Image (spheres, rainbow, N blue to C red):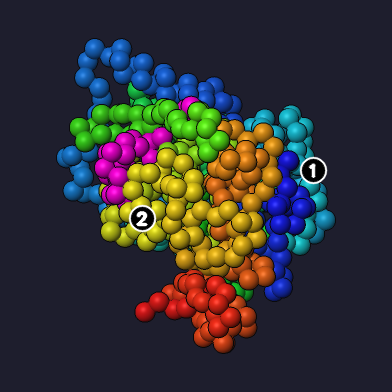
Amino acid sequence: MVTDIKSGNLPNFSDKLANDDGRIRLEPYECIHEKLSKGFFQKYFKKDPTTVRQEQIKKRQEQTSPLQSSPRKTEIKYRKPMRIAFNFDNIYEDPHACYEYGQKIILIESDELHVPSSRCTYNKSCEYTCKTSDLITTEVQLFFTNYITPTLREIVASYILVDPEEPNLILDAGSYNKTNGTCLTHVIIPEYYITHGIDQADLVIFVTIRPPTEKNIVAHSVPCNFRDYGTHYSRPLAASINFNPSFFTQFIYDPHDLTYEEYIKVSLHELTHSLGFSSMFLSSFINEDGHPYDASIEVQRSGVTPNGEPYNYYKRAINSPNVKKVIRNHFDCKSLEYAELEDSGGYLDWESHWEKRVVGEEFMVAWASPIMPVTRLTLALLKDTGWYDIDLTKAEKWVFGKNLGCDMLKQCYNNTWNYQGYFCSRGGQPGCTCTRMGKGVCRLAVLNNLEPQYQHFVNTSLGGTDGVFDFCPTYLTSYPARGNSRYCIDNSLYSNLDAQYHELYSMNSRCFEFVSPNNSVGQACWEMK
């Protein structure tokens, strides 16, 4: 149980919020990639990530002849921008999508893959009544075919170069047969994708627009076709992506504002899982010599709580060459050997997201926010797959923890996070967030049974409200704005400007503290020049 220190009420962190303009905001976003990926592989391949890793490594060790390598060095000069082909067959006729108000459909992720959800239980069909926001109209179809997917295609092509599939992208027959010719739940792969292939494509994505089994899911994507070499998998050749219509239909006639940009980043987040940032593919990365290797390791984390209790625990991390180089340079910590992976959500988040306590605002953490930069860290991981060439100079700015050294990576204590906006100890106190992207509030809570690694005060029951952030006590910003907690980049708040202090909300605005005439400390959003 979590009790909000300031209000004394139990905070609800699971509902979509509607702002004054009626638009649905996301708080929080739930990524179910690991859940669906695990279910998909267990159903069709009878394996989970741990089994895959163990089997592949064992086969490499048992081989007496040289490992089959990928022609990385010889063909790298021919790499070209990745071409994604989107298959839209299922948005026009899908028994699990909504076309009429009040229509009854079956939500199938849980039933098909035998994983639980908030709406469905094991092995039970989940009937759902379609709402207006779920409907796939002609306008919705055009919105996805003409706006959403072309945007994703353009973003991926701008970052990623790949060995082109020539003359056509031909999907793997072995994967096709194992999955009974499907790509996730009731999505049929055309047989000619196996025989003739897809022209001018390096990856095919099957698009669905279905209400998901979890209400806070904006989108989800899972790879479904790849080559199995025994010792490793190839890069994904095909994947599914499902968009939750209720989050996107509100933007059909006005595809702008901070929320829309956030949902595009969430969609890119899901697509990145299907490019290789997924637990099922981490042991199939290709090194400089063209041989497969495991990019993840198990690490032991240890420390002492503020109350003097020692602790040890284990988790997964990435120690591939470029990831290690990027994270060392970012934090100015030359002894750093890995980038931690998320472990707060059990198998839901394990190995498919960065640890939020370490990277903060980044588009591949297991928590969405309006600030989701595509950083050098994730681009470095994609480069380390060996499947892609990545231009790291195109990365977006990564501010969290920049040049703050090794100590801040140990744990979030008042002596290791003793920097502006990072650590807070007074619940309800306003302050600028650590990246200065918004005006925040120190959110503390009474939490029962906190594990030692999540204890950040002498009071072992006191912590922050963000579990994905390892309950680190920090200044959090609300979106949509609540009270004075808001993002400085949200230019829709122009009517809330404090003219007395010459505030401005814009993409170049940041939060700064000031001392008012009555000697109190305030916060204002000012534009950076």
| Residue 54 placement: quadrant | top left
| Residue 518 placement: quadrant | bottom right
Kind of residue sitting beneath label 2: Lys
Query: For the residues carrying marks 2 and 1, which lies nearer the camera in this image?
Result: 2
- What segment is highlighted magenta in the picture? 312-339
Residue 506 image offset from top left, x and y in percent: 49, 77
Q: Secondary structure at mark 1?
A: strand
Residue closest to the eye, 141 or 215: 215
Taking the magenta stretch, the answer to whether it contains residue 321 is: yes
> Does label 2 or label 1 sit earlier along the sequence?
1
> Which residue is under mark 2?
402
Q: Relative to residue 92, is residue 51 depicted above or below?
A: above
Q: Which mark is residue 217?
A: none
Which residue occupies 45% across, 38% down? Answer: 341
- Determine the CA span between mark 2 and mark 1: 48 Å
Kind of residue sitting beneath label 1: Glu
Q: Which mark is residue 127?
A: 1
Residue closest to the eye, 70 or 277: 277
**How crowded is the residue under tag 1: few (<14 C-alpha within 10 Å), some, or many (20+)?**
some
Taking the magenta stretch, the answer to whether it contains residue 472 is: no
Is residue 16 visible to the viewer in this orientation of the structure? yes
